[in-house]
Amino acid sequence: MSPIAPLPDFQPATGLLASLDLLRVETAGPVLHLRLMRPAKRNAISDPLLAQIHTVLVNLPADIRAMVISGEGEHFCAGLDLSELVERDVGGAVLHSRAWHATFDALQFGRVPVVAALHGAVVGGGLELASACHIRVAEDSAYFGLPEGQRGIFVGGGGSVRIPRLVGVACMTDLMLTGRVLDADEGRATGLVQYRVADGQGLAKAVALAQRIATNAPMSNYAVMHALPRIAEMAPGEGLLTESLMAAIAESTPDAQERLRAFLDKRAGKVVKG
Amino acid sequence: MSPIAPLPDFQPATGLLASLDLLRVETAGPVLHLRLMRPAKRNAISDPLLAQIHTVLVNLPADIRAMVISGEGEHFCAGLDLSELVERDVGGAVLHSRAWHATFDALQFGRVPVVAALHGAVVGGGLELASACHIRVAEDSAYFGLPEGQRGIFVGGGGSVRIPRLVGVACMTDLMLTGRVLDADEGRATGLVQYRVADGQGLAKAVALAQRIATNAPMSNYAVMHALPRIAEMAPGEGLLTESLMAAIAESTPDAQERLRAFLDKRAGKVVKG
Amino acid sequence: MSPIAPLPDFQPATGLLASLDLLRVETAGPVLHLRLMRPAKRNAISDPLLAQIHTVLVNLPADIRAMVISGEGEHFCAGLDLSELVERDVGGAVLHSRAWHATFDALQFGRVPVVAALHGAVVGGGLELASACHIRVAEDSAYFGLPEGQRGIFVGGGGSVRIPRLVGVACMTDLMLTGRVLDADEGRATGLVQYRVADGQGLAKAVALAQRIATNAPMSNYAVMHALPRIAEMAPGEGLLTESLMAAIAESTPDAQERLRAFLDKRAGKVVKG
Amino acid sequence: MSPIAPLPDFQPATGLLASLDLLRVETAGPVLHLRLMRPAKRNAISDPLLAQIHTVLVNLPADIRAMVISGEGEHFCAGLDLSELVERDVGGAVLHSRAWHATFDALQFGRVPVVAALHGAVVGGGLELASACHIRVAEDSAYFGLPEGQRGIFVGGGGSVRIPRLVGVACMTDLMLTGRVLDADEGRATGLVQYRVADGQGLAKAVALAQRIATNAPMSNYAVMHALPRIAEMAPGEGLLTESLMAAIAESTPDAQERLRAFLDKRAGKVVKG
Amino acid sequence: MSPIAPLPDFQPATGLLASLDLLRVETAGPVLHLRLMRPAKRNAISDPLLAQIHTVLVNLPADIRAMVISGEGEHFCAGLDLSELVERDVGGAVLHSRAWHATFDALQFGRVPVVAALHGAVVGGGLELASACHIRVAEDSAYFGLPEGQRGIFVGGGGSVRIPRLVGVACMTDLMLTGRVLDADEGRATGLVQYRVADGQGLAKAVALAQRIATNAPMSNYAVMHALPRIAEMAPGEGLLTESLMAAIAESTPDAQERLRAFLDKRAGKVVKG
Amino acid sequence: MSPIAPLPDFQPATGLLASLDLLRVETAGPVLHLRLMRPAKRNAISDPLLAQIHTVLVNLPADIRAMVISGEGEHFCAGLDLSELVERDVGGAVLHSRAWHATFDALQFGRVPVVAALHGAVVGGGLELASACHIRVAEDSAYFGLPEGQRGIFVGGGGSVRIPRLVGVACMTDLMLTGRVLDADEGRATGLVQYRVADGQGLAKAVALAQRIATNAPMSNYAVMHALPRIAEMAPGEGLLTESLMAAIAESTPDAQERLRAFLDKRAGKVVKG
């Protein structure tokens, strides 16, 4: 594997995005970096932090084409701030969980792909946040768990929808019933993460991936983010029809026609063994 | 990995559960151990053995909160007793398979989580039984196969529903078309089992896991057993709503509120790297 | 792992199958070997090549019971011939993709199982072809990618339906967003391939598997090809009913009854650790 | 429409079925008639009444081949006994609803088809019970509603699963949001009931239908009860495969072969306009 | 049917809602009335009109508990403003349709139920808007069609998702292939509308329904809007579990407990024939 | 309703289509008329007749844009020729049913819409054939039934997939359990047919509809035939994405752009009440 490029020169975001006190938002060209800034609480997601993430997603600058999420301090994110769950009535608890869903759906089905740079604790709601991203990079220090089972509660941030699609129901059942904690290598083996790097290299790797993603045709990225996961949900007979429609649209864009001509004119590279 | 605790002191079950001649049923506190006792037939599942398993499930003592299944002798279970399939008419064959489904559904969607301790042959109907459990522990000696393809028949105990959800359709296709046999490590790599231990340690590991599971809030275990696999089946938009309902219920129980307060008061441990 | 048997003596097919200029078709007993013969184009799939594959599938000799697909030259198949996509209108593009679907559905849901012998590039449409086969064998040289993301297009040969069922949506998302290329071992770890062999041994392994598959009862192979993947798509409650029907039919065939009696008379082998 | 035949001579059931104090169970040949006997409470379904219905279903005499359900007094069934819902904790409420599901699933997916004879109030849980039957006959006096919306609660006896499959989500939404009550003719027009008769004729019509149903081949009735609703749930590509399996099994039974020969020998009637 | 109550005294909305020039927004107690105000264009939905509807939905006053939509002039809404579709590239066309989906999803899955008062043309996008509402009332003059088939286009405002769930695929196929137009009675018979009134009475009927809906417990209305349609989408086995969760939550609210006690104390009415 | 136009001047098909002895095939402009010609057997579908229908579908002349199916003699089609089911083994019975599926799928998902003109018996396999068409017209004499229940068999021509999508599972359950026969008006009320005409007018009405359908843009007809029923099967979240793709493609065709301009230039008619 080739060495990871050094981080580009990130600049603080301006305007509304600069006003969010629980996040640090900065950009380098087409890549935006959102950093959870609640290290004293192991970046636990309180309602205000959740709202600030949602705010970034609906106010993404027009020139941003890929995004990275990371956490300040020793941990990516240790989950939901459990004080949010105490003394809430059952109806309010439903709506509380639905607000998490609205934010994480805005992340997964947003305008740009998101790469998560993971280290330290990635547990509970932190794992739910990570699983809503499109690609996950884990440092050696990363570990994964779902302590909800021990706390007497259940996941409420989309974890029961997204985590089984990464690792299967049996693995998630094990994590919740036994409190098992997976280390970074186990996270890779089970499918929780796609990239493994040494401690301190997660952000650089995530940014490098985001930079590459930003060079794709926007319609291709749209197709991968919006059509691919939905086609995979459909019965095969229905999915194939949708694939044909998506393929026809993508290849009909001027962008694709230009890229195809570049390839046929041998101005673009072939795929070679990595 | 920490050493596995010695087995607790199991006592034979009494009453109806003591009368089952093809099983040995014993309990230690909240954990029940069901052992297949047909070693001369490699614990092949005959109709009477199937009925006895079903009987245990519908007569589980009220204080039991987790369960372990294991097999006496050199093998966990070598499958369906094939003599059951000869000279049965096609209508009767449908109902025979449906009786397996009723028993294994009672296991998967019962009241308490079940851990399987696997060694030796875990093939055919034995693999179907194992895949209906919630967690699987495999000793070195364990091996996995689906000889139905070579016998000219098809799985009929839920295997085509549960095994692809563990290993994927492609792996199960390979097992059935080619008669391939997976060893314990391959079973781990493909997702068939969640824990790998040395020969002779499977039961102790399974019991230790069951003891830990028995300490969870009952509503959390219910949510993991009943809601999680069903949410994972739903289209995401529908699954998220169900997750919110399940989460709201779990966190509204007095048990959860007490556990949350213990955590917030720092009377409960944080998740740390295993 | 035992040594792979030498290739049997393949004879060229005759009649219509001998007239296809972009393929080489040959048979050895019940096994048919179809070889892509466009090595100068890295076996890229043009419309005529696609039509020739479809032609083989609808004209399979009656005595063939298993099939192998391989590629001539240094690569299995480098994908769709991209010149097919230029200057096609959007309606025509839909129908073009649907023709790929018709061919690959005829492969997946045909009369006989198909084993793919993979080496070199298995990318884009080549990976879509491989994923429509029932079992995949990869040599050391094999590598896997989906360059569609970089070309500005989207998969149109069933890739978004079949590849997530092998490796998950997250892995396919990574391949498409970042242009990542997997080597043979990564292909094995992610579930893309079921068998890994040294360079030069892929065809022999694939043929050996096909020979073994050809000895199964035809109804068992039909059940694995046609019922298993569809049952796996169904909600569990519906899938179990279908499994019971399929099991009852398979075990009611004279072929199955004879094989069951052979087993009960101890004329057939037990499953043993591989 | 031809006149409805007079009721056959029903005899009280014996043994366990005679001991149920909230029901009256009687049989005439292959038809069993279960009558709700709590008229002072408008046959509201209390937990004991629910358990008694379940008891009948799991103790159905072997010679019974069809069943009729009716209600004593002025109403079929006015729903759940609401006193069951007061002071129950949220976890207990989940299990309470699941017990209704177990009983009504045993009815819908039991061994014999069930015809409901409806008159007066068929509301709330009473409509849920009726919708779990296979055929519904309504007298002029019958009316249908879901007052749960006005009571501040939600259906919990399978109504949200079964009623939209009869009348559509929009109609059920209207019933629940506005408290609308449908009369017998509106019940027929929306699909809630299949037969409309004058007051006092519901039971005779239901019994006549049950007698006719009892003459069908048991495998045909099994296919209609167990396979048809599940096939209808499947994606079409999957449903068609299951239909082929079910059809092959049904037509392979000796019963079907005899009936087919009778038809071909002109010993059975053709279908003619009613 | 009882006479429809006269309209309550509606007051113009204030603030942001008063600033929308293509709508008239007014309230009477807990009911908000949104009126399309583009009669010269037969209330065709342009992009600005769509955005104004979305704006109302995300700025609904907190005390509103039900909503009515109607159209000024001779028609409810004659559809999409077709000038929006000319000279839009294919990628832009996808996003244009997705904006319709976002608005109509906000309507269907919003906070309060919506009743549509329909008269005159309810065609194309107008029918898509109506079908996203929870209840539809049609005056004699109302007629329904999908001229997209004749225009060479396809529905893009959710029509292919919502209209088949009201009338079936066969009816929608007929409307689109042949240009068939349904009158108000046919709309009632096919399930497009739930209420039929004389010309000039649609708004009063819709408001009366909305007033009644506004008296329900908010959690019951939430359950009907959010849980019921999703449960109906699920496979039955999964839907039943979700129903139990929703029922347990609804009946655990203080509101429900109070209403149940009122009923048991005979302070609330029984359901009687309408 | 306006009077039905007289039949256009149909000419016999030539070439292969003229050689089919169990059908009469004729064309008038863009409309092809296929007539079942086995009146002495009430047009019962034998294997040769099924194969001839399939042959027409795969050899449709390029200028045909819509199709009508009718039956010679007193009945449209009395079903499967039951002699096909006798003495067939269970494996062969599966493949026999699958051949019906292949033919009727080729009809439903073919290149042109198909209108069925129904009279007399439309029962069993005849009803399955009719339900695979896109629009159904029934004369007064038409009647509908599924005698499979009485014959001891089950539907095998797609009936359990297509008929519940027209009339619901409850109605089909009634037809199969009780042998109920629906007349033409009941067929209209339950959704089996879309148009009702007097005896002798079915063919003229069907041809008039086909002529109108033939004037639509081919991409619109493709969208209605191929995308609409599949979108309706998908979960709503997935269906909406597919709708957007299909709408974007349809409106991007030159044909649609020309039709939209004609409308905007007021060269095309508005939708008016029929």
Image (cartoon, coloured by chain):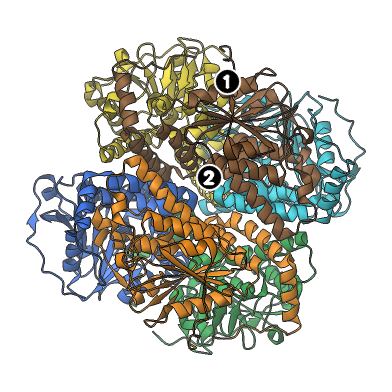
Chain colours: A green, B orange, C blue, D brown, E cyan, F yellow
Disc 2 versus disc 1: nearer the observer: 1
Chain identity of mark 2 = F
Give whichever of E111, A56 is nearer the camera: E111
Label 2 and label 1: CA atoms lie apart by 63 Å
Which residue bears the numbered disc 1? D9
Residue E245 x/y as whole percent: 67, 55
Residue A226: x and y in percent read: 53, 59
Three-letter code for the amino acid on which mark 2 is drawn? Ala
Callout 2 touching callout 1 (CB < 8 Å): no
Relative to D159, say whether D263 is above or below: above
* Marks 2 and 1 share the same chain: no
Residue F67 is left or right of residue A170, and the answer is left
Give me the residue at 31% from left, 61% from top.
B146
Callout 2 environment at 10 Å: few (<14), some (14 to 19), or many (20+)?
A: many
Q: x and y percent of residue D23 in the render?
A: 66, 35
Secondary structure beneath label 2: helix
Q: Is residue B52 left or right of residue E124?
A: left
Q: In this view, does A160 lie to the left or right of E114?
A: left
Q: Quadrant of the N terminus of chain D?
A: top right
Image location of residue D157, percent across then percent down: 66, 45
- Badge 1 crowding class, 10 Å Cα cut-off, few under 14, some 14 to 19, many 20 or more, is few
What is the chain identity of the residue bearing mark 1? Answer: D
Which residue has dot 2 on it?
A: F247
Regarding residue C226, the answer to whether it shows in the image is: yes
Point out which mark residue A3 bears: none
Residue at 40% in and 37% down? F109
Determine the secondary structure under disc 1: loop
| Residue nearest the viewer, comparing A144 with E82 | A144
Q: Measured along the vertical axis of the image, is residue F1 above or below residue E23?
A: above
- The quarter of the picture where residue B130 lies is bottom left
Amino acid bearing label 1: Asp
